[in-house]
Amino acid sequence: MMTIYLYLQLLSEATGKLTAHHGDVLRFSMEKLFPEELIKPWNDKPPDIHIIGNLPFNVATPLIFQYMESIYNKTDAWRYGRVPMTLTFQKEVAERMVAHPGQENRCRVSIDVQNLCYVTVKKIIPGNTCYEVFVIFFTSKIIYSKRFTFVVLCHGVILF
């Protein structure tokens, strides 16, 4: 994991367009991470922010629940608007996120994510160890409710 961080630091130095953070993602707040001028209304295009992460199995599900709550409440990174994310997941977690009603692996994460997101499997990256990795791309979007208030949904595309 640290090797990836070192490569990201090199990319950051080379481009000036990337900021890499290393730490506990479950405790990392993005509430004030970006400049205030990047804040966009939900019905505008997404802000010039993109979250990228490589998630270990034991962190993926709690983090997804945390992010879905933040998207719903427009807090943390999503106070800036419809911030897209590209996150890696192990095959089992990604398959649960896209499981349809009636499928054996349908569970709470399927329901929560699909309530706020559209997710589509695009590709599987075969691992050089014992597991495959799924990369999931999320972009928030807006849908009007019957009362003409905004309900935030997340549009996601799974790229493997």
Image (cartoon, helix red, strand yellow):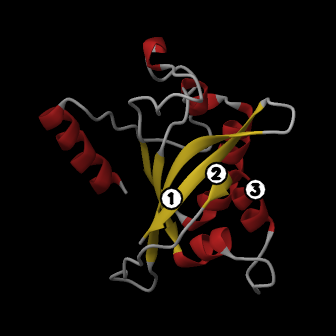
Q: Does residue 29 appear anywhere in the picture?
A: no
| Disc 3 residue type (three-letter) | Asn
Q: Residue furthest left?
A: 14
Residue in the picture at 66% in, 29% down: 75
> Residue 35: where, in percent of width, then height?
43, 16
Q: Which residue is mark 3?
A: 115
Question: How busy is the neighbourhood of tag 1: few (under 14 within 10 Å), some, or many (20 plus)?
Answer: some
Q: Residue furthest right?
A: 147
Quadrant for the N terminus, please. bottom left
| Disc 2 residue type (three-letter) | Leu
| Disc 1 residue type (three-letter) | Leu
Quadrant for the C terminus, please. bottom left
Q: Does residue 92 appear anywhere in the picture?
A: yes
For the residues marked 1 and 2, what is the alpha-carbon distance in whole angstroms? 9 Å
Q: Which residue is mark 2?
A: 63
Question: How busy is the neighbourhood of tag 2: few (under 14 within 10 Å), some, or many (20 plus)?
Answer: some
Q: Which label sits in the foreground, 3 or 1?
A: 3
CB of mark 3 within 8 Å of CB of mark 2? no
Quick check: 106 left or right of 37? right
**Of pointers 3 and 1, the one earlier in the residue sequence:** 1
Q: Is residue 132 above or below residue 98?
A: below
**Residue nearer the viewer, 72 or 29:** 72
Residue in the picture at 51% in, 37% down: 83
